[in-house]
Image: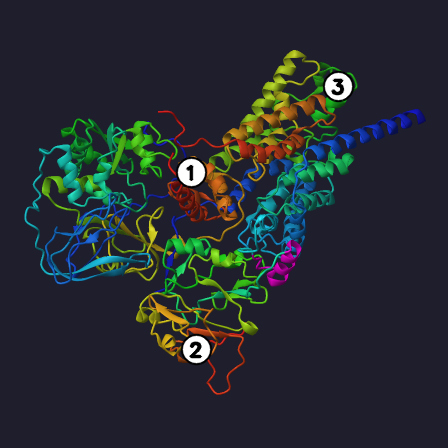
Amino acid sequence: MKKTFRIGGVHPHDNKISAEAAIEVFPAIETAYVSMAQHLGAPATPIVAVGDKVKVGQVIAEPAGFISGFVHSPVSGTVKSVAPRADIAGNLVPHIEITVEGDEWMEGIDTSDTLVKEIPYTPEEIIDKVKKAGVVGLGGASFPTHVKLAPPKDKKAECLILNGTECEPYLTSDDRIMRERPQEILIGGAIMMKALGVTRGYVGIEENKPAAIASMTAAAKDFPQIEVVTLKKRYPQGGEKQLIDAVIRRQVPSGGLPIETGAVVQNVGTSLAVYEAVQKNKPLIDNVITVTGSCLPVQHNYKVRIGTPMSKILEVAGGLPEKAAKVISGGPMMGRAIANLDAATVKANGAILVLTEAETRRRPESPCIRCSKCASACPMGLEPWLLNKLSRAGGRHAELEQERVYDCIECGCCSFTCPAGIPLLDLIRISKAEVMKIMRSRPKK
Amino acid sequence: MNKLIVSPSPHAHGRESTQSIMRDVLIALTPAMLVSVLASGWSAFVLIVAGVAACVLTEFLIQKYLVKGPVTVCDLSAAVTGCLLALNLPPNAPWWLVVIGAVVAIGVAKMTFGGLGQNIFNPALVGRVFLLVSFPVLMTTWSDDGSMFGIVDAFSGATPLGAVKEGLKNGMTLSQLTADDLTFSQQFFFNAGGSAGELSAIALILGFIYLLCRRVIKATIPVTILCTVFVISGIFWLANPEKFTNPLFNLFTGGLLLGAIFMATDYVTSPMTTKGQIIFGIGIGLITVFVRYFGSYPEGVSFAILIMNCTVPLLNKYCKPRRFGEVKK
Amino acid sequence: MTGTILFTIVTLVALGLLFAVVLYFVAQKFKVEEDPRIATVESILPGANCGGCGQAGCHAFAENVVKAPSMEGFFCPVGGNPVMTKVAEALGRAVEEKAPMVAVMRCNGAIANRARTNEYDGYASCKVMASLYSGDTGCKFGCLGKGDCEAACQFDAIHVNPATGIAEVNEDKCTACGACVKACPKGILELRAKGFKNRRVFVSCINKDKGAVTRKACSVGCIGCGKCAKTCPFGAISVENNVAYIDFTKCKMCRKCVEVCPTHAIHEVNFPPKPKIEPKPNEENV
């Protein structure tokens, strides 16, 4: 009986049409535009100036607060400008523009493929190396990893769960790295377990990735403290709270943080980045991006340096087809629709998905028929029909808080399911932000 | 190339729509409609057609000329109401009866509340009860009209429930009444004397299975209602088998199956959470049994459902779903 | 028979009298003492309960103005000066007349002026759209046209024109309650003085991007060139963050700035047409 989370969930088509596309190294670019907003929290502060020469892996920006991170140059060349540039939403964000010259790496970075298994570092050293390498959560949230590996004193970590579920349809980058680089992922896992001081580790993989399961299970023979767990194919199996519920049968308390269950969850991509950071001294400067869509003639999994314009990636992948109606950064359930295709990639970008009009045009909204399928689908046990109604009424923040709008993980199951085509999540998301703002502004007891 | 589309997530949608759900309900009703037409002939067919046409026309006219808003008859919800209403009437009822019922069902019970999704009471049942109260004779006489192709033998007289009620009132005991009564298998496959929709339990159950497979309804409400009726009537029957009909008889006669499967499970008028649905089902079961045993009407399902419809807003308010994070470690 | 009727009548009348007495005493015991002036003031107020005064409805306004030592800080925009004068009279106080205000739409980025660069397919709300991204045009400051202002207005005074795709204020119905100003996520609407003979001059743009970027996105946007500020004889115009702003307390409505603006971003409202100058394409007469 395969494990899965206990409440809600939907079953979109998984559309893993890019699963057999082995990872290709993306060709060299001419200019890199490195965003300072590569992570949750405050954007990093640039420490280079126009005209400076930089090498691959050189620090070009420093953290600007506790929740912030280092940013390293993904290319070698000359800094052309330090100026605002538009992100995928068209909003201006500070960027460092670097004209590429050659591909010279910083001294000390091991660019070979040799597997390094020994972990001679102390937990503090590990966390420091992860921080200095600018590693952030690659599952989409971009939370600085070094912060997650050092939980507050009053919260005890009991186990590490590596998230290899990749529950979003279309996405296959995690599948590919689990098939192609399983040992590095597991060594990364062992490193993080040492940093956290835990002795139990799990890798959760959805059942629709048999090759990845086989590959990781075979590699895990050398890692008796890490267990590969096959999970049912169900969205959002990869949601942090849902994954913890599925693997160790514990639910994060309402309004609480995952560490309260004792579990620390990290994406397999993050684990790979930790391996490279600690064992190879390589900072996070590239990521695997799935370029996919039914209207694309060829599917790809590219290893792309951060700062590559998305329009360039689409050009190399064969160009944007005539039928393309929407381009998404991420998957169809939680990805962000791109308004500005010239935006450059950031660390946590994992996919560029091209959808046709038929696949994505929203149907017109019709009245709610009170079927409560949204409530059945909600993995957090909320009532989206009620949250939407309260949001539309306006000013009912107290009731929204009572109905736990802050627990919403914005997975999109409700809008996906609604037979009447009501865009439930559109307004719930806004109310959640407003209510959380009100809650944060209250004086702490 | 056209401009790119930008919207908040999610960017994909499931396959279900209001229309596809209503279509599934119509398909699930088809076996019952077929049995009714085969057993009762042309008049049953006319009733169904007239019912659907009247409901759809009423909704169209009100939406276009009174409300002056968008016309939504394509979502098939009015058609479903029409079918259910027709199946709730005696098969030989005149066509104008179902038209009046349709106007009340759609015009009063649905549109005055604001249209689809806003009504408190099940429209088909409101139509039926209105007709029952306004035309008591027409609504309670079942006379044979000649079945189609001679498949079923002619019958006449009251429904089994009606006969029981009359007999008990006249002081007869159940063993005296049931001597000539139908055997169990006859009731299951073809229950002689009943409204068009009551005629075949198996046809209704086939529809139920279809709806479950298509995930249109969950089994919670029908199962709760039927179990409650079975248990409560069982308790009374064990206490006094001469005065109270047995549980199986109660399950398969009258509009209980039709009501439990198709009327009580109407999305708009039933609770939104499992806990609420269980309470709802128990309430309907209890009221049905009490009306059948102690009330002056032989059939209690319609009233039971309408009464429990009133409690739905309260049930929605106090019965919340299982929240994530409430489970203890 | 008559005995029954008599008995019924007597019993019911007795019960009625008993309940009336009980209710009387209860009403007296639990009576809330309220200053009678509050009710008087409340009857003078329009009773729209729109919140435009900043109070929680007309009753709250009445309560607070009676309790307050002066009329300072109290103004009902819907009732305006006539109502405030009457309220002051009722309370035996003096009150200053306030200049009437009106909501002003500071964006002229109609579809004809500002090309759409993508298509928004989400829930039709400016708040949702603004939180998602910078908008469906090249100008990230302009009107999104989804009608949050229209939904907020209780006086039917602001509507999104489907032909232009942006909101338009009906100055005859506008009471300057401020609901639309609060509702607009872009801060485009502003309460400004209605002006002598309802005339006013304002910059119909709040775009803070550099002039070249603005110009590319919208043909009538303010490019921050500063000509208006240099021309204004009264120092009413300031240019900050690449956008000009006219201070309505200083503006004397000479309209010299309107003539010099290269993109016709400055609008004049309700003026008689000038005979000599060539007709301006963006002159508004709401």
The amino acid type found where label 3 is placed reads Leu
* Residue B299 point in image, percent of width and height: 69, 28
**Magenta stretch?**
C75-92
Q: Are marks 1 and 2 on the same chain?
A: no
Q: CA distance from mark 1 to mark 2?
A: 56 Å
Residue A378 circle label: 1
Residue position for label 3: B168
- Judged left or right of residue C277, residue A444 is left
Q: Amino acid at mark 2?
A: Val
Residue farthest toward the left in the current orientation of the protein: A107
Q: Which one is closest to the eye, mark 1 or mark 2?
A: 2
Residue depth check, mark 3 versus mark 2: number of the one nearer the observer: 2
Q: What is the secondary structure assignment of the residue under circle 1?
A: loop
Q: B151 or A369, which is in the foreground?
A: A369
Which residue: 15% across, 35% down? Answer: A124
Q: Are marks 3 and 2 in contact (CB under 8 Å)?
A: no
Residue C61 visible within the image: yes
Q: Nearer the viewer, residue C78 or A3?
A: C78
Q: Residue B259: say if magenta.
A: no
User: Which secondary structure, mark 2?
Assistant: helix
Q: Is residue C170 above or below residue A404?
A: below
Mark toward the viewer: 3 or 1: 1
